[in-house]
Image: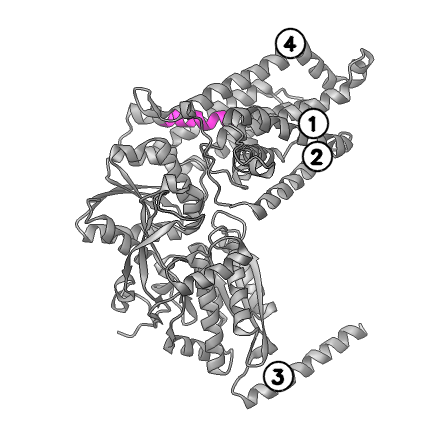
C-alpha cells in the first residue's frame, strides 16, 4: 500500500515536472514518452505481408532516429487484431486511454482500419495507415488525424486497369473478398474498366480466408470474361491463383489479374506459377540503392524482404518522428500540421505529400513477375514495368468526398 | 443467374472433393472418440503437420542430411507422413492423454485444444502464414480430365478415389473384422477383454496413432491443392467438427457419409447462393441437433 502511494506520488511529481518543462518549450512531449503502437494482423491470412515484419520496420525507424525525440524516449508496442474490427477497436481504446499511445500504424484490413481511425480521431490521436486499402479512409470516413500512407484501392484499380484494358482485357469478372476492402477494390476497378471502354460481366464474393476457390473460379470461367480480377489479398489471392492454374483456366484464354499482390505472395506462389503477372505496388525492395540498403538491413532481422506495408511503416514512423521534432511537441494537431506541410521523400516515397484528406500521394509502380530464368536469387521476383507519378496514380483532391477538403 | 445442370454437377463434384477431406478427417475423429472417448481438437494441427512433413521432406530433409539431391517424393510422403505424425500421436497418447481417460471429456478437449494452439503457434513462427507451395505433385496426376460436364483436375480425382478407399477400408476393418471386434469390445468392457489376454492399453495407443495418421494422410493429399500453411488445419477443423456432430459422435459410417454429403451440399449452395455456403453446414447442424440430438447416425445413449 505504502509502495503504491509512493509510486503515485512519484508519478504526480514527474507529471508536474514534465508539464512544467513542456510549458517552457511549447507543449513538449506528453507523459514523458512518445509511444507508437503497431496494431495489425500478426497471425492470420495477412500476417506475412504485414505482421511482425511491420513492427520490426517501426522499431528500425525508431532506432535509426536515435531512440529519442526532444530528449524523451520513444517506445514501440505491438498487438494482433486478428482481422476483427471489435478486437482492433478495443485494443486501440486500451492503448490510447491507458497506455497513452500517441500514434498507431500498421492497421491491415480495411474493416479494422476504418474502426480504429474513427476511434483514434475521436480521441485526437494520429493513425498512419500502411496496411489497409479502402479509399473510404480518405473519403467519406476521413478524419483530421488519419493518414493513409502506402496505397489504396483507387491507385491499385487505376494503374492495373490502365495496363490491362488497353492490352485486350475488355471484359472482367471479379472474385471479391466479402468485406470493406474487397468491395472498395471491386468498385474502384470497375469504374476504371468501364471508363476505359471495358465491361464488367459479374462478380462473386467469398469470405475472408478461404481455402478452396475452385467453385468461385468455375463461376468466373463460365462467365466467359477475358479477365478474372481478384479483388482480395494475401493467402486468398495465392490460393485463387494456384487453383486457377490447377483447373487450367489460364490455358483457355482467360487471364487472372491480382489487384493487390505483395512480394510475399509471389514468394508463396513460386515464379513458375506467377510469372508474367502484372500488378500495382507502392514499393519494391530492389528499385534502387536506397531501397536495397534498407531491404538488406530489414532482411538481416526479419529473414524476408520488406513488403510495401512494412517499408511504408518505417517511412511513416520516421516522418512522424521528424514532424514531432519539428513541431517541438507530440500534440496531435501540431504534428498533423507539420506532416501535411512536409515533403515526404525517402527510400520509400518518391515525390510524397500528405494531402488535406489524409492521403499520402507518391509514385506508384506497375510491376511484372519475372520468369524463373530471369531471377537471380531467392527474392529476385519482380521488375518495374512503369513508374506512375503520384499525380496520376491517386484520386485527385477534386474528386475526394472528404469533408476536410475545401472546395 | 440461371442454374444449369452442368453448373450444378461441377459444383457438386467440387463439393465431393471437399467432402472427402471432411470424411477422412471426421472419420479419424470418430475412431478416436469411439474408442478413447477423447474429443481430439488437435486433429486440425495434425492434419497440418502431415502436410508439412510432405513439404519439408521434399524441400529440406535432403540438404539437412547432407544429401542435397534427396527429395522425399509425393508417393513416399503418403506413407512417411502418416507414420511420422502417427508416431508423434502415440507419444502424445502415452505421455498425456492416457492420464485423462478417467476424467470428463472436457479435460481431453482442453488438452488437445492446447496442443493444437502450441503446434500451430510454433509453425506460424517459422513458416509463411500465407502458405508455401508444394511442388512435388507427380507428373502422372497433373493435367485435367474431361468429365463431360466439366474439366476436372486429375489430381483431385485421385484424391477422391484414394480417400474413399481409405475411408471404407477403415470402416470395414473396424466393423467387419476380428481385430475391429476386439477394438469395439475393448471400449465396451476393457476389463473383460483384458481377461481374454488382449493388451487393451496398447490397442488404444495404436488406435489413437491410426486416427492421427489418417489426419496426416489427408494433409499430404491436401498439400498440392492448397498452400501448405500453419493455419490450414484450424480453418478446416471447425467444419469437420460440425460434420462429426451431424453424423453422430463416434459413428464410423456416419462420419464418412455425412462428410461426403455435406461437402456436396456445400457445393450445391455455392450455385444457389454463394455467400451462404460457409454457413449452410452449421445451419444443418442446428437443425439436426434440434430434431435428432444424437446425430443422424448416432445411437441414443
Circle 4 residue? B177
Q: In the image, which is nearer the foreground, mark 2 or mark 3?
A: 3
For the residues marked 4 and 1, what is the alpha-carbon distance in whole angstroms? Answer: 22 Å
Residue positioned most to the left: A197
Name which residue lies at 67% across and 82% down: A14
Circle 2 residue? B108
For the residues marked 2 and 3, what is the alpha-carbon distance in whole angstroms? Answer: 54 Å
Circle 1 residue? B37
Q: The disc numbered 1 marks a residue on which chain?
A: B
Asked if residue B67 is positioned above or below residue A24 in the image, the reply reads above
Residue span colored magenta: B11-21
The quadrant of the image that shows the C terminus of chain A is bottom left
- What secondary structure do most residues of the magenta stretch adopt? helix
Query: Who is closer to the viewer here, A239 or A212?
Result: A239
Query: Who is closer to the viewer here, B170 or B191?
Result: B170
For the residues marked 1 and 2, what is the alpha-carbon distance in whole angstroms? Answer: 8 Å
Which colour style is shown? one colour
Name which residue lies at 21% across and 48% down: A165
Q: Is label 2 in a helix, a strand or a loop?
A: helix
Circle 3 residue? A18
- Crowding at label 2, few (<14), some or many (≥20) Cα neighbours within 10 Å? many
**CB contact under 8 Å: marks 1 and 3:** no
Same subunit: marks 2 and 3: no
- Crowding at label 1, few (<14), some or many (≥20) Cα neighbours within 10 Å? many
Q: Quadrant of residue B9?
A: top left
Name which residue lies at 56% across and 15% down: B169
Asked if residue B84 is positioned above or below residue A341 in the image, the reply reads above
Q: Is label 3 in a helix, a strand or a loop?
A: helix
Describe residue A319's horizontal placement relative to residue A171 as left or right. right
For the residues marked 1 and 3, what is the alpha-carbon distance in whole angstroms? Answer: 63 Å
Residue A124: image location, x then y, percent = 48, 73
Amino acid at each position: 500500500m505504502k509502495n503504491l502511494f509512493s509510486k503515485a506520488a512519484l508519478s504526480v511529481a514527474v507529471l508536474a515536472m514534465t508539464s512544467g518543462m513542456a510549458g517552457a518549450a511549447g507543449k513538449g512531449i506528453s507523459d514523458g514518452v512518445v509511444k507508437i503502437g503497431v496494431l495489425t494482423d500478426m497471425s492470420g491470412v495477412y500476417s506475412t505481408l504485414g505482421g511482425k515484419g511491420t513492427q520490426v520496420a517501426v522499431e528500425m525507424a525508431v532506432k535509426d532516429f536515435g531512440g529519442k525525440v526532444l530528449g524523451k524516449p520513444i517506445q514501440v508496442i505491438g498487438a494482433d487484431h486478428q482481422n476483427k474490427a471489435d478486437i482492433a477497436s478495443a485494443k486501440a481504446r486500451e492503448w490510447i486511454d491507458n497506455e497513452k499511445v500517441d500514434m498507431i500504424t500498421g492497421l491491415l484490413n480495411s474493416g479494422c482500419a476504418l474502426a480504429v481511425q474513427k476511434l483514434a480521431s475521436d480521441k485526437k490521436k494520429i493513425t498512419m495507415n500502411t496496411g489497409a486499402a479502402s479509399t473510404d479512409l480518405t473519403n467519406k470516413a476521413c478524419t483530421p488525424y488519419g493518414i493513409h500512407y502506402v496505397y489504396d484501392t483507387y491507385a491499385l484499380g487505376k494503374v492495373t486497369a490502365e495496363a490491362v484494358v488497353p492490352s485486350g482485357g475488355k471484359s472482367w469478372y471479379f472474385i471479391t473478398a466479402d468485406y470493406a476492402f474487397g468491395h472498395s477494390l471491386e468498385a474502384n476497378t470497375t469504374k476504371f474498366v468501364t471508363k476505359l471502354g471495358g465491361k464488367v460481366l459479374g462478380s462473386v464474393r467469398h469470405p475472408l480466408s478461404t481455402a478452396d476457390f475452385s467453385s468461385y473460379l468455375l463461376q468466373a470461367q463460365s462467365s466467359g470474361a477475358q479477365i478474372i480480377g481478384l479483388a482480395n489479398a494475401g493467402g486468398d489471392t495465392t490460393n485463387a491463383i494456384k487453383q486457377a492454374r490447377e483447373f487450367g483456366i489460364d490455358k483457355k484464354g482467360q487471364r487472372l489479374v491480382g489487384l493487390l499482390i505483395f512480394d510475399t505472395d509471389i514468394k508463396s506462389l513460386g515464379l513458375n506459377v506467377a510469372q508474367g503477372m502484372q500488378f500495382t505496388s507502392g514499393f519494391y525492395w530492389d528499385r534502387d540503392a536506397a531501397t536495397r540498403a534498407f531491404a538488406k538491413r530489414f532482411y538481416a532481422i526479419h529473414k524476408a524482404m520488406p513488403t510495401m506495408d512494412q517499408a511504408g511503416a518505417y517511412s511513416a514512423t520516421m516522418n512522424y518522428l521528424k514532424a514531432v521534432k519539428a513541431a517541438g511537441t507530440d500534440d496531435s494537431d501540431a504534428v498533423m500540421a507539420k506532416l501535411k506541410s512536409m515533403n515526404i521523400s525517402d527510400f520509400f516515397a518518391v515525390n510524397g505529400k500528405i494531402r488535406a484528406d489524409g492521403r499520402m500521394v507518391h509514385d506508384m509502380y506497375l510491376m511484372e513477375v519475372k520468369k524463373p530464368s530471369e531471377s537471380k536469387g531467392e527474392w529476385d521476383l519482380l521488375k518495374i514495368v512503369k513508374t506512375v507519378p503520384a499525380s496520376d496514380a491517386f484520386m485527385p483532391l477534386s474528386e475526394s468526398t472528404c469533408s476536410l477538403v475545401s472546395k | 443467374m440461371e442454374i444449369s445442370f452442368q453448373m450444378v454437377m461441377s459444383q457438386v463434384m467440387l463439393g465431393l472433393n471437399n467432402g472427402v477431406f471432411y470424411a477422412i478427417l471426421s472419420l479419424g475423429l470418430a475412431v478416436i472418440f469411439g474408442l478413447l472417448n477423447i474429443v481430439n481438437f488437435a486433429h486440425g494441427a495434425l492434419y497440418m503437420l502431415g502436410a508439412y512433413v510432405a513439404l519439408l521432406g521434399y524441400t529440406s530433409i535432403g540438404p539437412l542430411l547432407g544429401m542435397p539431391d534427396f527429395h522425399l517424393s509425393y508417393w513416399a510422403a503418403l506413407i512417411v507422413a502418416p507414420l511420422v505424425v502417427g508416431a508423434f500421436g502415440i507419444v502424445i497418447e502415452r505421455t498425456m492423454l492416457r492420464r485423462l481417460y478417467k476424467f470428463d471429456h472436457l479435460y481431453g478437449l482442453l488438452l488437445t485444444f492446447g496442443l493444437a494452439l502450441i503446434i500451430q503457434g510454433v509453425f506460424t513462427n517459422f513458416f509463411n502464414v500465407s502458405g508455401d507451395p508444394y511442388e512435388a505433385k507427380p507428373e502422372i496426376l497433373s493435367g485435367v480430365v474431361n468429365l463431360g460436364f466439366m474439366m476436372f483436375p486429375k489430381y483431385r480425382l485421385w484424391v477422391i478415389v484414394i480417400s474413399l478407399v481409405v475411408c471404407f477400408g477403415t470402416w470395414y476393418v473396424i466393423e467387419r473384422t476380428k481385430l475391429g471386434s476386439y477394438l469395439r469390445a475393448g471400449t465396451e468392457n476393457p476389463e473383460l477383454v483384458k481377461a481374454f489376454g488382449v493388451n487393451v492399453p496398447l490397442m488404444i495407443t495404436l488406435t489413437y496413432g491410426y486416427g492421427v495418421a489418417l489426419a496426416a494422410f489427408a494433409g499430404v493429399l491436401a498439400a498440392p491443392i492448397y498452400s501448405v500453411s500453419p493455419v490450414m488445419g484450424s480453418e478446416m477443423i471447425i467444419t469437420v467438427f460440425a460434420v462429426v456432430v451431424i453424423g453422430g459422435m463416434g459413428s464410423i459410417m456416419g462420419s464418412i457419409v455425412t462428410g461426403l454429403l455435406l461437402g456436396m451440399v456445400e457445393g450445391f449452395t455455392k450455385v444457389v447462393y454463394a455467400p451462404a455456403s460457409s454457413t449452410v453446414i452449421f445451419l444443418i447442424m442446428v437443425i439436426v441437433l434440434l430434431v435428432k440430438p444424437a446425430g443422424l447416425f448416432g445411437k441414443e445413449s
